[in-house]
Image: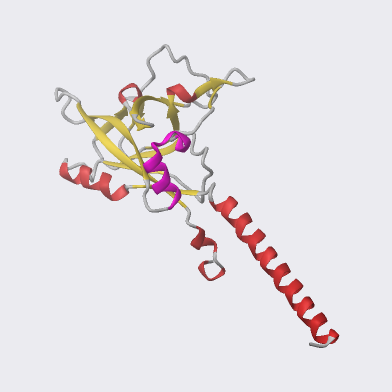
Amino acid sequence: MTSRQQLDVIIVAVYLISVAYVLYRAYQSISEYVEEQTIITFDKAGLDSQLAERQLKDVIDVNFGFGGRYTFDQPQDLGITVANKSKDKTLEIDWDRCSIQSDGRSRRVIRFPPDRRVDLSQRQVFSVIPPGGVIRERVSAEDLLKVNANNALEPKGPLVTIAALPPPAKAAFLSSTSDIKFSMRLAVWIADDVVEDRPNALHMLNCQFSIKRVPLSEYLPWKR
């Protein structure tokens, strides 16, 4: 092999090593980014099935807003919309009967008023929704709330602690082969405005959510 050929081999080897290193760093960077990304979905079909079974599809509609992707320390609260679809019934959300099931336990739901000043030792005021009305609220779990510099409560941790998952469940989640489930029980009183002597009916609605880790394949160029 001539000195010229040897030089060409060295140049090609250096080039290939450089390309491999750049690709490795790019892969490593993407892996670190994706590892912190999740998608959260609300099982709307499951809730609608509950409403249909109770003949409430024309009375109440419930939805939760999730947009984009979240890091592992999110969400810390939930945005909920409740609509009264009826013409002659009043809905009342009993927040103290609501609960969030996550991290292996049941947690009291706290609704944030506009100024986020809440006395956790007191009962919460019901949210009243007249016929045709809609409310939009943000809620969180009581044990996550801390007082900030403005003397208002704000959540200081995620509703689901991924780091605290049992090892098998955590491994399945990180490999994107299994979702994390959590839920919220929504307590709704329904009063008939026409028949005044009819007692209110309490309905406990189970709202299910799934957290899925975004797989690395979602970041490949042809997936975008």
Check the image and report above or below for 42 versus 88: below
- With 198 as the anchor, is 83 left or right in this view? right
Check the image and report above or below for 67 versus 91: below
In percent of width and height, residue 7 lies at 82, 80
- Is residue 192 visible in the rendered image? The answer is no
In percent of width and height, residue 175 lies at 43, 52
| Most foreground residue, 102 or 20 | 20
- With 151 as the anchor, is 17 left or right in this view? right
Q: What is the basis of the colouring in this image?
A: secondary structure
To which quarter of the image does residue 206 belong?
Answer: top left
Residue 164 within the segment the image draws in magenta: yes
Residue shown at 55%/24% (left/top)?
Answer: 115
Check the image and report above or below for 185 versus 176: above
Residue shown at 38%/20% (left/top)?
Answer: 125
- With 199 as the anchor, is 132 left or right in this view? right
| Most foreground residue, 79 or 83 | 79
Residue lying at the far front of the rendered structure: 1
- Is residue 68 visible in the rendered image? The answer is yes
| Chain part drawn in magenta | 161-175
To which quarter of the image does residue 89 belong?
Answer: top left
Residue lying at the far bottom of the rendered structure: 2
In percent of width and height, residue 72 lies at 51, 41
Residue shown at 45%/22% (left/top)?
Answer: 143
Residue lying at the far right of the rendered structure: 3
Q: Main secondary structure of the magenta part?
A: helix
Residue 126 within the segment the image draws in magenta: no
In percent of width and height, residue 70 lies at 52, 45
To which quarter of the image does residue 123 belong?
Answer: top left
Looking at the rendered image, the quarter that the N terminus falls into is: bottom right
